[in-house]
Image: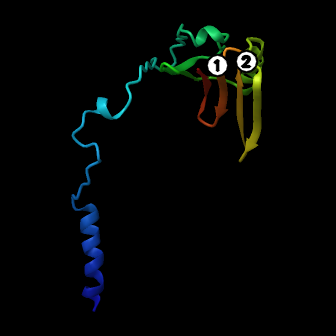
Amino acid sequence: MRIAAILPILSLLLLLFGGCKAEPADAGVPRSETAPALETTTASPYDSVWVENEFTALVPRPPFTIRSFSATERRLTVLFADAQLSSLRSYRDALAEAGFTENAETQDLQVAGVTVFRYEAANAAGYTVQLFSNPGASGISIEK
């Protein structure tokens, strides 16, 4: 009786861990045909590189060390290494002075003892900026 109860469980475990491998639907198709090509550049950690492009021309240079950045045709995201909340709030004011005031929304709240901060606004040209800080990450994203 005991063997009869264990046998189905053992069979299931063998199927799960025994080398059975399902292939994704796009198996064998080159990655370039399954995902859009993104022009992404990542700076080496903590090298304070501020890229010059159409997105960064819209905002004041942030007073933070740049951890990394990535860019596509529609978006630039820059992660900061050392942004303090008070400095992020001041930088939010600088973004507003640079014209990012349309549909402006600020979230500045405590969640489980940690402050989560986000500012999102658009400018007259239709670009949207999002300044954010949460546990483990802070940065800015600018999007067409």
Residue 22: give its label: none
Q: From the viewer's side, name the closer residue of 38 and 108.
A: 38
Apparent side of residue 126 relative to residue 14 in the rendered image (left or right): right
Q: CA distance from mark 2 to mark 1?
A: 8 Å
Which residue type does callout 1 highlight?
Tyr
Residue at position x 59%, y 35% from top?
A: 136
Residue at position x 22%, y 59% from top?
A: 20
Q: Earlier along the polypeptide chain: callout 2 or callout 1? A: 2
User: Height in image: 130 above or below 6?
Assistant: above
Around disc 1, counting alpha carbons within 10 Å, would you say few (fewer than 14), some (14 to 19), or many (20 or more)?
some
Percent of width and height locating residue 5: 30, 85
Residue assigned mark 1: 127
Q: From the viewer's side, name the closer residue of 121 and 3.
A: 121
- Identity of the residue furthest to the bottom in this view: 1
- Eye-nearest disc, 2 or 1: 1
User: Height in image: 10 above or below 142?
Assistant: below
Residue assigned mark 2: 100
Q: Secondary structure beneath disc 2?
A: loop
Residue at position x 78%, y 12% from top?
A: 97
Apparent side of residue 49 relative to residue 126 in the rendered image (left or right): left
Percent of width and height locating residue 71: 49, 19
Asked if disc 2 and disc 1 are in contact, CB closer than 8 Å, the reply is: yes
